[in-house]
Image: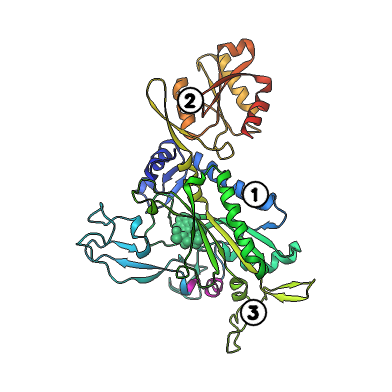
Amino acid sequence: MSAPNIETIVSLSKRRGFVFPASEIYGGLGSSWDYGPLGVELANNIKKSWWRWLVYERDDIEGIDSSIIQNRLVWKYSGHEQTFHDPLVDCRTCKGRFRLDKLLDVQCVDHPEVHPGENKDCSLTEAREFNLMFRTTMGAVSSDDDPAALAYLRPETAQGIFINFANVLNTSRRKLPFGIAQIGKAFRNEVTPGNFIFRTREFEQMEMEYFCRAEDAPRLHQEWIDGFQAWLQSLGISAANMSLYEQSAEELAHYAERTVDIMYRFFPEREDESKQWDELMGIANRTDYDLRVHSKKPEDAEGKRINPDSTEDLSYFDPQTSERFYPYVIEPAIGVNRTLLAVMMDAYTEKTNEKGEVRVILKLKPEMAPIKVAVLPLAKNNDEIVTMAKKIKHELQSSMRTVYDDTGGIGKLYARQDEIGTPFCVTVDHESLDDHAVTVRDRDTWVQERVDVDSLSEYLGSRLR
Ligand code: ATP
């Protein structure tokens, strides 16, 4: 089983401290969210897994961390100033403002039971283009619209990689094919954000640009599509809730040769199965477009430099063939926040206990679990038990994220840990004082085992692996 809808995860997140509405004490801020004590751990675990898989466990990828604010020319030559638009429509009746291609994700203001355009009263305007980049000004400015001071918050992390291509190539002495990976915040002034953390105006991306020869690009593209499906499954996302979407020729970005989206069943409650899916990540073959447009040399059909502002040529010299060319690039791009939502939705299960009560169990993979072990004293008024439990917590915490909790009866404490996905609870009871052993309870099976304290760390470590 997985979560029946996103709302279930919204309320679990608020109740247990994964994600809170941002600026809540001032009435909130449309579609902004703050990550609480458990949410930040889960997000970090996702980012660590991505980074380890790409940067540490392979031999051909380097990491970088580029600035959020770059020279405005980056966004001029990348094409974002000209083309990073979404089609915007207004409803003359309800005064709502919507993204034309995402009407299904939102409700009509006057008739929330239907989507915009689906009611006879709805009167949508023609679509017009709306640029999604957040604008700001940099330095002391004469006026708010001083063009010399205009800057943008990056709408994607990818461009920070392209403009550093020569820096990374020269310092790391890489040969094709190789990749550059980056994790960081991105900002888009989305027309209709919503669906919890699925679409927000501030979010975090994990992007990798894999540079290669043109003739190798189709094969490597397919390898990354396969590889990312396997990685997502390693996070606990089931194959049954993932699907592939091949972008049609009309949908493809003008520079892309082929783009495949990995879709997740974010909307299982929708009756029409085909409408249950939305993009979790995109994997594009972007050709040599990006390195070309940021380079000083390439010329257009009339012999004019396409980029008279760049001071660098981002081409690659192959010493074996003595050829110089602009590498193709395969880009797997995924959002941390959407991944977190998919991981939580997929891990969500319910189980009925012997008293007939429904309990939530978040069956996260141990690697994803914000807390690996909870140490619980059976009697919080017994000093010896409490001391022993706290000592065990301190011994475990250097090798696995461990918490101590004595704020309720044992049944309640177990239920709380199940709900946040803690794989193991360790209970210290009266017998522990005599036999130097504790009860280890498994989150998924509720089976309890007696384990000697001296071998506890090793026992838990091996089960968590
Ligand atoms: P969409 O079609 O959903 O707007 P996109 O195709 O514009 O997404 P990309 O530019 O390919 O998205 O960005 C790569 C990834 O970044 C997406 O697959 C998604 O996981 C994440 N992402 C993009 N926009 C947002 C957003 N507004 N909020 C949260 N995550 C986002």
Q: Which residue is mark 3?
A: 296
Q: Which residue corresponds to the image point at 25% horizontal and 63% vertical from the top-left?
A: 95
Badge 2 crowding class, 10 Å Cα cut-off, few under 14, some 14 to 19, many 20 or more, is many
Q: Which residue corresponds to the image point at 55% horizontal and 63% vertical from the top-left?
A: 284
Distance between the Cα atoms at labels 3 and 1? Answer: 34 Å
**Which quadrant of the figure contains the N terminus?**
top left
Q: Nearer the viewer, mark 3 or mark 1?
A: 1
User: Which one is in front, 427 or 392?
Assistant: 427
Disc assigned to residue 53:
1
Amino acid identity at mark 3: Lys
User: Which one is in front, 39 or 142?
Assistant: 39
Residue 97 vertical placement versus 440 (above, below) = below
Amino acid identity at mark 2: Tyr
Residue 157 in the magenta stretch? The answer is no
| Helix, strand or loop: magenta stretch | helix
Q: Is residue 330 left or right of residue 187?
A: right
Residue 365 vertical placement versus 316 (above, below) = above
The residues colored magenta run: 72-81
In the structure shown, which secondary structural element does the residue marked by tag 3 occupy?
Answer: loop
Q: Position of residue 204 (x, y in %)?
A: 52, 54
Residue 200 vertical placement versus 85 (above, below) = above
Q: Are marks 3 and 1 in contact (CB under 8 Å)?
A: no
Residue 181: image quadrant is bottom right
Residue 190: image quadrant is bottom left
Badge 3 crowding class, 10 Å Cα cut-off, few under 14, some 14 to 19, many 20 or more, is some
Counting residues from the start of the chain, the first of labels 1 and 2 encountered is 1
Disc assigned to residue 414:
2
Q: Is residue 383 left or right of residue 16?
A: right
> Can residue 187 be seen by looking at this rendering?
no
Counting residues from the start of the chain, the first of labels 3 and 1 encountered is 1
